Image (cartoon, rainbow, N blue to C red):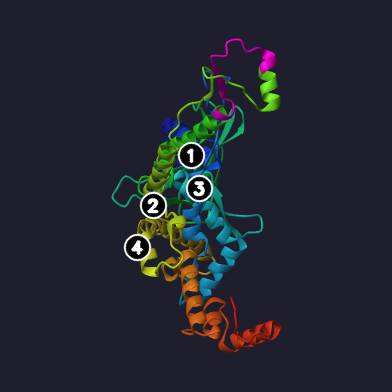
Amino acid sequence: MIDIDKDYILKLIEAKSTDNIRLTKLLDYYKGQQDILFRVLSDPTKPNNKIVANYCSLIADFFNSYLLGVPIKYSSQNEGFLNEILNIFNYNDEPEHNVTVGENMNIFGLGAEILYIDEDKQIRFKSLDPRETIFIHAKDIEADLETCIRFFPITPDTYTVEIYNKETVATYTMNSTFSELEMISELPHSFGGVPLVSYANNQILQGSFEGIVELQDALNKLLSDELNDFEQFVDAYLVLTGLQGTEKEDISRMRENKVILLDNESNAQWLVKDVNNTHIKELKEDVTGRIYTIAKMPNTEDFKSLESGVAIKYRMLPTETQATKQERYFKKGIQRRIELIANVLKLTSPAIGDYREINIAFERNFIINDEVERQKMLIDVNSGLATKIEYRMRFYNETFDQAKEAIRKIDEERQDNNDGFEY
C-alpha cells in the first residue's frame, strides 16, 4: 500500500498548478496566442494591427524534427529480445509517439509518458501532458524516481489524482481547492518500477524557445506598428496653407478631379509621421538575428547554395550542441521505457534480455547538406567530372544497373543524348 503524506501531496499539486501558468503561456506562444493579440491602444481611432511572426513554433518544431524526424533505430545481438521490443514499439506507433513526446519536451521543457497494460493484455505507452504530471525523485545521490503524481480535472470542481510507485497505483479524488484527498482504489502493476518516464529538454527543464519570448514580443510589436504607420500614412491629412476660404464643395471637386489649383502664396502637403524605414528594417533584422542566436537555431536563408559541407557544419555547431544535449536526455528516457517493458516480459520469459542490450541510434533530420552536395555534383556532371550514373546512385539510392537503365529511358524520351540534360 502507498504510504503518503496527503498534505505534502496537496502542496506539490498546488505548487505545480502555479508553475502551470508559465507552462500554459509557453503553449499559447507555440500556438500563436501571443501578447500582441491582446494589445489595446488608448486611442481607439488609431490602427491597431496585431501581427504574430511565430518563431516560437518554428524553433520548437525545428528541434523536434531535427532530432526525431528520422525514426530512432534500434539494434542488438540479442535478436529475440530486439524483436519483442520492436513488435511492442510497432504496436504503439513508436515514431509518432516519440514526436509527440519531443514536441512537449521542446515546448514545456519536459516530456512525459505512461506505460500500462491495455484490455488485450498488450503493453502500451502514451504521452502525457507535463502540466498534469509530477515526478518525485529520491533525495540521495542516485536521485531515482520514487513516486509520480498525475492529476487532471474530471468536473469543474473535482480532480482525479493517481499516485504511482514501484508496485502500485492509488487513485484519489481531490477538490478544486487542493485541500482534500479521498482514496478510491489501489491496484498493483507489473512494471517493476514507477511506470512513467520523463524526457527533459535540458537540466533546468526550460523550453526550447523560452529564452526568446521577450524578443518574440518585440518583433511582433515592430511588425504591427510598421503596418500601423503605413495605414496612418494612407489616411494622412492634407494640409492646405493660404487657402482659408476653401469650402467642403471645393475639397469634393479636388478629390473628383485629382487637381488642386494654388497661387504663389498657397501650399498643400500631407501631414505624415516621419518614419526612418532603414532604422526599422535594421531593428527587425537585429531582433530576428538575436532570436536565432539565442535559440541556437540556424537561419537557413543565410546559407549559400554552394557553401561547403565544412562551412555548413560550422554554422550548425550551436544547433548540433543543443541537439546533442536533447539526444542524451531522450536516449535516457528510451532506455527507461525499454527497461520497464523488459520487466513485464521477464514475468513470462525470465531470460529474455536486458535493456542495456538494445543499442539506440539517432540520425539528424536535416536536408541542407544533401542539397549542397546535390548542387555541387550537378556541376560536376555538367562539367564531365562525374557521371549521371554516379549522380543517380548517390541521390536516388539506385544500383549501377538501375541508374544505367533509368538514364537510358530518359535519353530515349528526350532524344537529345546528353545535351542540356538536367536532373
Residue 295: where, in percent of width, then height?
A: 40, 48
Q: Is residue 10 above or below residue 209?
A: above
Question: Which comes before the other along the chain, label 1 or label 2?
Answer: 1
Residue 179: where, in percent of width, then height?
A: 49, 26
Q: Amino acid at mark 3?
A: Asn
Task: Return the residue found at the far front.
Answer: 264
The magenta segment: 233-250
Question: Which comes before the other along the chain, label 2 or label 4?
Answer: 2
Q: Amino acid at mark 1?
A: Leu
Q: Is residue 358 above or below residue 380?
A: above
Task: For the residues labelled 2 and 4, say whether their Cβ atoms are less than 8 Å apart.
Answer: no
Q: Which mark is residue 314?
A: 4
Residue 363: where, in percent of width, then height?
A: 46, 66
Inter-mark Cα distance, 4 to 1: 30 Å
The verdict on residue 249 being magenta is yes
- For discs 4 and 1, the disc positioned in front in the rendered view: 4
Residue ID at (52%, 30%):
229
Residue identifier under label 2: 296
Inter-mark Cα distance, 3 to 4: 29 Å
Can residue 111 be seen? Answer: no
Q: Which mark is residue 104?
A: 3
Residue identifier under label 1: 26
Residue 15: where, in percent of width, then height?
A: 43, 32
Task: For the residues labelled 3 and 4, say whether their Cβ atoms are less than 8 Å apart.
Answer: no
- For discs 2 and 4, the disc positioned in front in the rendered view: 4
Q: Secondary structure at mark 3?
A: helix
Q: Secondary structure at mark 4?
A: helix
